[in-house]
């Protein structure tokens, strides 16, 4: 049995909990000096993420393979880590027109924990197990446990339960050799060093986790054909800004004039992807829809190679 003293010793050994003498006098700095110091530390995060690109690529390949077979991406974390997973999941439907069930964010303590600290929730391993049971996680799913320390019971429990259910697993943490990484098929361990405010992992660790989540979903969606080049062709045009974006996307992809673009978007319920194919080919809506479906939604694969405007 682990004693409180042993647990304290383990925590104290974590990079994310370290107290750095470099930041011991931050309360004596003027405002600009303090901001300069924090910003300088933030600038090191992308470099730390870069060291993990091979592992992130491996995780992306798992997600793409799983989604092609009908699986999902499930994030699970507590506190800041959990909120970042929920944030990334919630951005996928408007950006890539995905079903909200395709990328799921789970946070210890449930939705209340998004805005209010739920004491003890991160230590509730059974809470993660119950959530994965509710989702009926299986072999085509990929579960990403997120924990700055790499030891949060909720995140580790989620990965262990997912593995028991046959799912593929990823552990995203900010400490090397973490329990979370050991429990996962792929360990992404972005070591960003001690925080400016010791132990405040909403800082560099949180930024690192956000960057990795961005990479996981963006790269996966590009690989799945949710973009055409770098154009967001599956954007949901649900407000004026996004309708304007859809118009600009279709214009960029086809070179058609404004009236033609407007007509094509109107004929396809404001959706950029079929509007682009219609303008490039001159096909009727029924043929456009059938072609896109036959290409598994990948616009580049749906466009005939003989089309003059095909980029």
Image (spheres, helix red, strand yellow):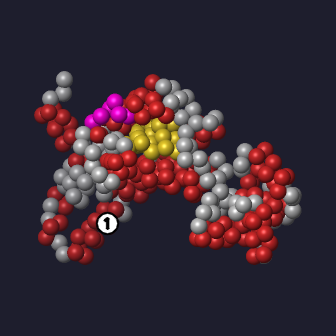
Q: What residue range appears in magenta?
A: 123-128
144 left or right, relative to 237 = left
Q: Main secondary structure of the magenta part?
A: helix
Mark 1 closeness class: few <14, some 14–19, many ≥20 residues within 10 Å:
few
Residue 231: name its quadrant: bottom right
Q: Who is closer to the viewer here, 7 or 164? A: 164
Position of residue 118 relative to residue 310, above or below, is above
Q: Quadrant of the C terminus?
A: bottom right
Query: What residue sits right under mark 1 in the picture?
Result: 40
Q: Residue at x 28, y 65 (%)?
A: 38
Q: Can residue 177 be found in the magenta stretch? A: no
The percent position of residue 198, horizontal first and vertical second, equals: 20, 54
Q: Residue at x 30, y 34 (%)?
A: 124
190 left or right, relative to 122 = right
Residue 102: name its quadrant: top right
SS type, badge 1: helix
Q: Who is closer to the viewer here, 28 or 231? A: 231
121 left or right, relative to 271 = left
The percent position of residue 104, horizontal first and vertical second, equals: 49, 44
Q: Residue at x 15, y 61 (%)?
A: 24
The percent position of residue 101, horizontal first and vertical second, equals: 54, 43
């Amino acid at each position: 049995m682990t004693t409180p003293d042993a647990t304290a010793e383990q925590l104290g050994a974590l990079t994310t909990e370290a107290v750095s003498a470099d930041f011991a006098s931050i309360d004596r700095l003027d405002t600009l000096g303090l901001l300069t110091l924090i910003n300088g530390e933030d600038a090191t995060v992308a470099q730390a993420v870069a060291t993990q690109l091979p592992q992130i690529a491996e995780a992306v390949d798992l997600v793409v393979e799983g989604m092609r077979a009908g699986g999902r991406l499930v994030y699970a974390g507590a506190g800041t880590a959990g909120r970042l997973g929920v944030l990334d999941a919630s951005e996928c439907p408007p950006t890539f027109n995905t079903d909200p069930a395709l990328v799921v964010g789970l946070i210890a303590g449930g939705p209340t924990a998004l805005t209010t600290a739920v004491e003890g929730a991160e230590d509730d391993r059974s809470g993660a197990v119950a959530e994965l049971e509710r989702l009926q996680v299986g072999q085509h799913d990929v579960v990403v446990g997120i924990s700055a320390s790499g030891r949060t019971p909720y995140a580790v429990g989620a990965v262990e339960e997912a593995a028991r259910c046959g799912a593929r697993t990823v552990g995203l943490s900010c400490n090397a050799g973490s329990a979370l990484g050991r429990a996962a098929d792929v360990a992404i361990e972005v070591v960003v060093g001690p925080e400016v405010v010791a132990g405040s992992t909403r800082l560099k660790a949180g930024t690192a986790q956000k960057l990795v989540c961005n990479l996981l979903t963006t790269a996966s969606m590009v690989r799945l054909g949710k973009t055409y080049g770098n154009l967001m062709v599956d954007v949901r045009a649900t407000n004026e800004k996004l309708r304007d974006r859809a118009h600009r996307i279709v214009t960029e992809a086809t070179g058609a004039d404004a009236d033609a673009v407007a007509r094509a978007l109107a004929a396809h319920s404001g959706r950029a992807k079929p509007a682009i194919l219609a303008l490039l080919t001159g096909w009727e809506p029924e043929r456009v829809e059938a072609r896109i479906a036959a290409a598994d939604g990948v616009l580049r694969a749906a466009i005939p190679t003989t089309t003059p405007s095909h980029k």
